[in-house]
Every structure is written in C-alpha cells, then in structure tokens.
Amino acid sequence: MADNRQGISEKVHSKIFKQGFTTKGVGKGTRLGLAIAWQIIVEKHGGTITFK
C-alpha cells in the first residue's frame, strides 16, 4: 500500500488542531478528532503532537 496524497497544505497548518476545522464536505465527520487528540495529549498529559 502506498500514500500518494499531497499531504497537508501550508494554509491549514495553523488550523489543523482547532475544534470545528475540517477539509471534508458538509455533513462528513464530526470535526473533533485532532482537537480532542490535542486536548488529551497536550493539555491533559503535557505531551506534544507534531506533523510534517
């Protein structure tokens, strides 16, 4: 299996962990996944999340 997608565009880097942000269409997904991950890992446990 290979990932041939373009990755995360520069224009969404600052928004990616914000609650409500999505790149999906209306009605697709809850828009909470990465925001919840941020809350659990960073805020509650003092960890870090990064991406490139």
Image: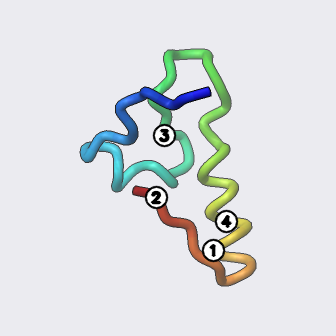
In the figure, 31 relative to 14: above or below? above
Disc 3 crowd rating (10 Å Cα; few below 14, some 14-19, many 20+) is: some
In the figure, 22 relative to 16: above or below? above
Residue 42, label in figure: 1
Q: Are marks 4 and 3 in contact (CB under 8 Å)?
A: no
Residue sitting nearer the eye, 5 or 42: 5
Marks 1 and 4, how far apart in space?
Answer: 6 Å
Q: Earlier in the sequence, mark 1 or mark 3?
A: 3
**Residue furthest left as drawn:** 11
Q: Earlier in the sequence, mark 2 or mark 4?
A: 4
Q: Earlier in the sequence, mark 4 or mark 3?
A: 3
Instruction: Identify the secondary structure beneath mark 2.
Output: loop
Mark 3: which amino acid?
Phe
| Tag 4 residue | 39
Marks 2 and 4, how far apart in space?
Answer: 16 Å
**Residue furthest bottom as drawn:** 46
Disc 4 crowd rating (10 Å Cα; few below 14, some 14-19, many 20+) is: some
| Tag 3 residue | 21
Marks 1 and 3, how far apart in space?
Answer: 18 Å
Q: Earlier in the sequence, mark 2 or mark 3?
A: 3
Residue 51, label in figure: 2
Q: Residue at x 54, y 40 (%)?
A: 20
Marks 2 and 1, how far apart in space?
Answer: 14 Å
Mark 1: which amino acid?
Val
Q: Residue at x 43, y 27 (%)?
A: 4
